[in-house]
Image (cartoon, rainbow, N blue to C red):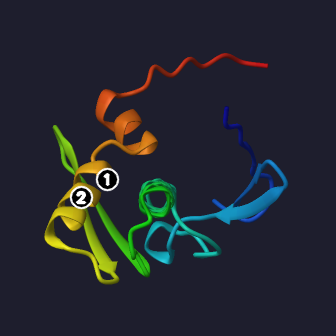
C-alpha cells in the first residue's frame, strides 16, 4: 500500500526519502548534531497523523455535504521511558453544529493512521 526508500550517504544524519513520485529530506536538529535540513523522524510521524486526520475529515464532511470550510490539526508526540503519547487538537472552521463537530472528532479516532498507531505494527527486518 505505501512504500518509502531512504538513502543516507552524505552529510551527517541527512537522509533523502523517496516515496512514490515524491522526495523529501529528513534530518536531526543541531542539538543532535544534525543540520536541521528537514523534519526529524518523529516530526514525520506527527505529520503523517496530522495529514491523515485532515484528509479523512475533509473527505467525510464532503460526502455528508457538511460546511467544513477548513481544518487545522496539531499533533504533539511525547516519548517517555516506558510509554509514549500523542496529543491531537482539531480546529474546525465552518458553520458546523455541535453534532457535526462531535462526529468529526469521533471520526478522527478512526482514521487509518490513527488505527495503525493504536494497534501497533509488526516490523520485520532483513539484510539485502
Residue drawn at point x = 46 percent, y = 66 percent: 32
Q: Nearer the viewer, residue 64 or 93?
A: 64
The residue sitting at the front extreme is: 65
Q: Nearer the viewer, residue 22 or 94?
A: 94
Do the CB atoms of the residues marked 1 and 2 lie less than 8 Å apart? yes
| Residue occupied by mark 1 | 108
- Secondary structure of the residue carrying numbered label 2: helix
Residue drawn at point x = 16 percent, y = 63 percent: 99
- Secondary structure of the residue carrying numbered label 1: helix
Q: CA distance from mark 1 to mark 2?
A: 5 Å
Say if 2 sits above or below 76 in the image: above
| Residue occupied by mark 2 | 105
Q: Position of residue 56 (x, y in %)?
A: 46, 54
Q: Position of residue 49 (x, y in %)?
A: 43, 54
Q: Position of residue 28 (x, y in %)?
A: 53, 65
Q: How many callouts does the rendering have?
A: 2
Can residue 65 be seen from the camera position used here?
yes
Q: Nearer the viewer, residue 118 or 53?
A: 53
Q: Image check: 23 left or right of 104?
A: right
The residue sitting at the right extreme is: 21
Residue drawn at point x = 43 percent, y = 80 percent: 70
Q: Position of residue 7 (x, y in %)?
A: 77, 48
Q: Quadrant of residue 110?
A: top left
Amino acid at each position: 500500500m505505501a512504500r518509502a526508500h531512504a538513502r543516507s550517504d552524505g552529510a551527517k544524519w541527512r537522509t533523502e526519502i523517496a516515496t512514490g513520485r515524491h522526495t523529501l529530506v529528513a534530518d536531526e536538529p543541531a542539538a543532535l548534531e544534525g543540520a536541521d535540513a528537514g523534519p526529524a523522524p518523529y516530526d514525520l510521524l506527527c505529520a503523517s497523523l496530522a495529514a491523515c486526520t485532515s484528509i479523512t475529515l475533509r473527505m467525510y464532511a464532503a460526502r455528508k455535504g457538511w460546511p467544513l470550510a477548513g481544518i487545522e490539526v496539531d499533533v504533539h508526540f511525547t516519548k517517555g521511558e516506558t510509554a509514549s503519547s500523542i496529543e491531537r487538537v482539531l480546529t474546525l472552521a465552518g458553520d458546523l453544529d455541535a453534532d457535526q463537530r462531535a462526529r468529526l472528532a469521533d471520526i478522527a479516532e478512526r482514521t487509518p493512521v490513527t488505527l495503525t498507531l493504536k494497534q501497533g505494527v509488526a516490523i520485520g527486518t532483513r539484510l539485502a
